[in-house]
Amino acid sequence: MMNGMDRTFYMDYAATTPVDPRVTEAMLPYLTEHFGNPNSLYTLGRDGYRALEAARERMASGIGAQPTEFVFTGCGTESDNEAVVCISQMVAERKNRRHLMVSAFEHHAVLHPAEWLAKNGFELTVLKPRKDGIIHAEDLQAVLREDTALVSVMAANNEIGTIQPLKDLADATHAVGAYFHTDAVQALGKIPFDVADLGVDAASFSAHKIYGPKGVGGLYLKKGTPFRPLLMGGGQEMKRRSGTQNVAGAVAFAKALELMLDEQDQEAVRLSALRDRIVDGVLNGIVNTRLNGGPPKLPGYANLIMLGCEGEAMLLQLDNKGIAVSTGSACSSGSLEPSHVLLSIGCPAEEAHGSLRVTLGRFTTDEDVDYFLEVLPPIVARLRSMNPLYERMYGAVK
Amino acid sequence: MYSEKVMEHFNNPRNVGVIENADGVGEVGNPVCGDVMKITIKVDGTDHIQDVKFQTLGCGAAIATSSIVTEMARGMTVQDAAKISKQQVADELGGLPPAKMHCSVLATDGLKVAVDDYLVKHGREPIAGPIKSSDPHFDPHAEEDEEHTHEEACDL
């Protein structure tokens, strides 16, 4: 605790989370003694099958669905791909609808398959959020068409944390007879999320964002939603996703969701307060800083801009002090453009290069926030003092 | 992934600052692209670079390449300094990720512009001539797009 090198101050919970020890404990027996293939008929297989179906029931009840509407997948990206491609293609075939609408700040796991469909017989509309980081229902209504097959808008954005008005968006979508998918990877467990209340037709989830293991995803498919499976083979997961199920992963995912729901109310309050301390500390303590997006926002999510600093340089300097955060700077990812999310809400590229995403979670403490607020200002001051344009653009470095 | 030497120069950059009354000044890059570099040089009566300093807005590689190029140029003649190539800069740092090679272009361009500024101020012919990255609208990634596609840049 005395200096950052003794431990990691992990503040990138939107990227991934450590597996909660209670989750590890729940899943371990299904890696060892109960290792059976859940599709085998003997006792060992039936043990696995029961655990898998119990996990499915818990996942389904956690999101307000029926067990037959919940499919375990390999990751959030797989769920997004299957929702976008497999629903759209089936709707096109059955109803001759070939128009897609996705928001501009979707994860690439939605954007890229939508772009692929646009090269393969579909028309694609990409709808920009407003500056507040929200897709407004009236903006969606304006681009919906009578041949729209699928609309996909994420439940909460992964970079700026803004929560989308899903019920209004789903209602608008259904008014033209189209289907509505939401990427709920970031939202699951952090805010109330009930598929029946929201009226969504499909939703994607991932275990590793909620203190479960990597390599486990989930896909909600409302009964009657057109869907042609991507993975073909043994017909597992009610013929929607072939492949031997990851029983231990499914058990872990269900346990992880149960813990999120048990602790949701208190964690929302705690993480919002910690996040507000970060935001207030940065905006009041460092000149020429800004906050991106929202409200409403996920608890624990803050996307901040330090004008006149480059994000990757800040990230590496913070890493030297043991703090892990992420940035929307072009230089951080090997890509050549800054974050498409920040550009979509009208953030100029030169500002997006200076963004830091700080996402707090279950193991973040008050001391972590104190430490971050102590370490960041001198890093920002040092990088600004090295910036040849800083004084010209923003005045003297303080 | 950055080499140890890149991280060492990023964490402890050499020759940061601005030389007052410099003999040559080079400023390249563009904040829209996230990289801006300014190099100032002091040159003696025999065209040798006595002192060189830099200021850089940019990522770890941009700062490290600026730092190393100032070390390489110190003591050189302006003619030799203008010949430092992006590959030499990258090699001196133990290599750079493909997506970061434009950073070494920026560092060598900054030095070339500073040398030309010195020569022109003394009524002599510039060596490098017009440098694309000293145009305020220059996009340092434009060449990069041709050399390394998105996918290749992700090849770890």
Image (cartoon, rainbow, N blue to C red):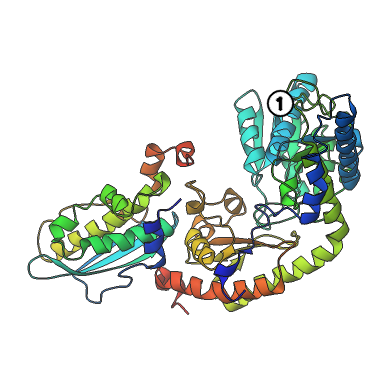
B89 shown above or below B23: above
Residue B138 x %, y %: 36, 51
Residue B88 x %, y %: 26, 50
**Quadrant (top left/top right/bottom left/bottom right) for the N terminus of chain A:** bottom right
**Residue positioned most to the front:** A33
Residue at image position (75%, 50%) is: A136
Examine the rendering and report whether any part of residue A358 can be seen: yes
B97 shown above or below B54: above
Residue A24 x %, y %: 77, 50
A95 shown above or below A60: above
**Residue positioned most to the left:** B46
- Which chain hosts label 1? A
Mark 1 surroundings: few (<14), some (14-19) or many (≥20) residues within 10 A: many
Left-right relation of A192 to B19: right
Q: Quadrant of residue A170?
A: top right
Question: Residue at label 1?
Answer: A98
**Residue positioned most to the bottom:** A398
Residue at image position (37%, 49%) is: B96
Check disc 1 and give the amino acid type: Arg
Residue at image position (49%, 41%) is: B154
Left-right relation of B112 to A375: left
Residue at image position (67%, 50%) is: A129
Which residue is nearer to you in this view: A340 or B51? B51
Please, what secondary structure does the residue beneath circle 1 have? Answer: loop
